[in-house]
Image: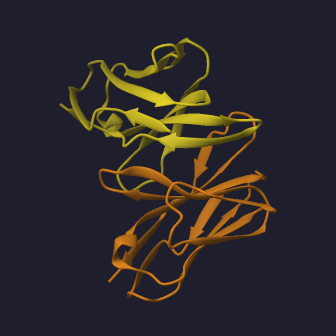
Chain colours: A yellow, B orange
């Protein structure tokens, strides 16, 4: 089976840094995604980690520790437009047949 | 033009009615998925298809059926709609490299 945990809601101040954590327990782990979803819109891809370590992409970075079943998304220099839900998703399976399982999402509220 | 489209975008129907939600894509991906999203429950996988001849049940397939008419088209049917199927439904595609999910705009379905 699989279990993915992330905080339900976080708040932060414009210009600050926020870290959104995701822990998972799953068999057949083969990568972890982060998606951003603004209210009423579709999720969009932010980052992908399959090996341990940090992946940096502009203001956003994502970290993975496979041995600990842990990932985080780091958002720097927060802007009001970063207010959204952030979804952690684990890819699992094998033999070329991988399916994603999503966490419940973290709603981030950025205030002035 | 959008790469993944869904029709209709909004639908209100009554209990017991048959409903079909349609999804089309121009990304050339073999893999397609149907999800539903409910507040507090995140995205849950209903069905997925890795090619035209491959259909698989996801986490919550009861009460739903699908048809993969072509590589570009994947339809979701509710044979007899019930109120707890009221949700936001997303279609998605993925390539077979990382399996990044590319989502359609969503269909908001209300069953009265």
**Residue A109 visible, this orientation:** no
**From the viewer's perspective, is A96 left or right of A77?**
right
Look at the picture and state if B55 lies above or below A87: below
Kindly give the residue lying farthest to the front in the view shown: A1
Q: Across the whole image, how many numbered discs are drawn on residues?
A: 0
Residue nearest the viewer, comparing A19 with B15: B15
Q: Quadrant of residue B11?
A: bottom left
Query: Between residues A52 and B79, which one lies in front from this camera angle?
Result: B79
Q: Is residue B111 visible?
A: yes
Image height check: is B78 above or below B24?
A: below
Q: Nearer the viewer, residue B93 or B1?
A: B93
Residue A14 rendering spot, x and y as whole percentages: 24, 26
User: In which quadrant is the C terminus of chain B drawn?
Assistant: bottom left
Q: Residue visible at 47% across and 89% down?
A: B17
- Give me the residue at 61% from left, 35% from top: A92
Kindly identify the residue that appears in the image at 37 percent across and 76 percent down.
B110
- Residue A65: where, in percent of width, then height? 49, 14
Quadrant assignment, res B39 = bottom left
| Quadrant for the N terminus of chain B in the image | bottom right
Residue A93 pos. (x, y %): 65, 37
Residue A47 position, x and y percent, is: 54, 28
Left or right: where A14 falls relative to A25: left
Residue placed furthest toward the top: A53
Left or right of B82 in this view: B61:
right
């Amino acid at each position: 089976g699989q279990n993915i945990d992330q905080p339900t809601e976080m708040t932060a101040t414009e210009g600050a840094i926020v870290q959104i954590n995701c822990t998972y327990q799953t068999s057949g782990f083969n990568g972890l995604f982060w998606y951003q979803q603004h209210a009423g819109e579709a999720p969009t891809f932010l980052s992908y980690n399959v090996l341990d370590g940090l992946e940096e992409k502009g203001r956003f970075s994502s970290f993975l520790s496979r041995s600990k079943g842990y990932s985080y998304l780091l958002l720097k220099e927060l802007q009001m437009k970063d207010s959204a839900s952030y979804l952690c998703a684990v890819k699992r399976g094998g033999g070329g047949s991988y399916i994603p399982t999503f966490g419940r999402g973290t709603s981030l509220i950025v205030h002035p | 033009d959008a790469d993944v489209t869904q029709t209709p975008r909004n639908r209100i129907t009554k209990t017991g009615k048959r409903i079909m939600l349609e999804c089309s894509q121009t990304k050339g991906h073999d893999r397609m998925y149907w999800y539903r999203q409910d507040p507090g429950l995140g995205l849950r996988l209903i069905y997925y298809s890795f090619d035209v001849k491959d259909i698989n049940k996801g986490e919550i397939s009861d009460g739903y059926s699908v048809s993969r008419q072509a590589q570009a088209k994947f339809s979701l049917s509710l044979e007899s709609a019930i109120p707890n199927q009221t949700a936001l439904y997303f279609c998605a595609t993925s390539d077979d490299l990382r399996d990044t999910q590319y989502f359609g705009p969503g269909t908001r379905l209300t069953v009265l």
